[in-house]
């Protein structure tokens, strides 16, 4: 996907999705970087100060719908940030193979929780998501 179009669409969606997901108190920076492997990544920089960075690889994304779902997925990581905070605290108390298993369990649990939330949102917010995607596509075609 074109970098400028992706940047424009995400800038349009971010404030609306933050409000929709109850993340208005978070300071979230968006970055585009075609060197990351995944379509998107979320880094919680500071939980106490509610700072996070979402990085999206526009080269791994074909259209606005996929971009929207990638951004929403990464925002859901922020919604579940308390789990990462808990994982960090547990990691300080555990070492070795147990730590690896706990980290794997937290990662798998978080991704499964996000998948379940996405499934729920896909069933209940179709109009919201579609209107935002259409809005970005319209901007792109202007
Ligand atoms: Zn994820």
Image (cartoon, rainbow, N blue to C red):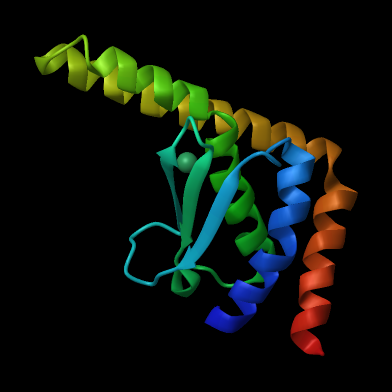
**24 lies above or below 96:** below
Please tell me in which quadrant of the rendered image residue 20 appears: top right
Q: Is residue 59 above or below residue 37?
A: below
The answer to whether residue 133 shows anywhere in this view is: yes
Q: Where's residue 94, x and y in %?
A: 18, 11
How many labels were placed on the picture?
Answer: 0
Rendered-image quadrant of the C terminus? bottom right
In the image: residue 93, left or right of residue 58: left
Outermost front residue: 49
Q: Quadrant of residue 66?
A: bottom right
Q: Residue furthest bottom?
A: 142
- The structure residue drawn at horizontal position 66% and vertical position 58%, both measured from the top left corner, is 68
Q: Locate residue 84, reporting x and y percent.
A: 41, 26
Residue 5 is situated, as x and y percent measured from the top left of the image, at 63, 80
Can residue 105 be seen by looking at this rendering? Answer: no
Determine the residue located farthest toward the left in the rendered image.
96
- Residue under the image location 49 percent in, 54 percent down: 54
Q: Is residue 95 left or right of residue 87?
A: left
Residue at the image point whose x is 53% and y is 57% from the top? 29
Task: Give the position of the N terminus as an image quadrant.
Answer: bottom right
Q: Position of residue 141 (x, y in %)?
A: 79, 87
Horizontally, is 58 left or right of 104 in the view?
right
């Amino acid at each position: 996907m074109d970098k400028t179009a992706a940047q424009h669409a995400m800038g349009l969606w971010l404030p609306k999705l933050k409000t929709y997901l109850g993340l208005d108190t978070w300071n979230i920076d968006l970055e585009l970087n075609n060197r990351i492997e995944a379509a998107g990544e979320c880094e919680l920089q500071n939980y106490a100060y509610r700072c996070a960075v979402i990085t999206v690889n526009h080269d791994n994304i074909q259209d606005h719908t996929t971009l929207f779902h990638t951004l929403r997925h990464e925002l859901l990581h922020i919604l579940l940030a308390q789990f990462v905070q808990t994982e960090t605290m547990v990691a300080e108390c555990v070492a070795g193979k147990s730590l690896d298993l706990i980290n794997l369990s937290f990662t798998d649990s978080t991704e499964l929780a996000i998948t379940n939330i996405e499934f729920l949102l896909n069933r209940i917010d179709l109009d919201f998501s579609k209107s935002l995607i259409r809005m970005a596509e319209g901007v792109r075609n202007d």
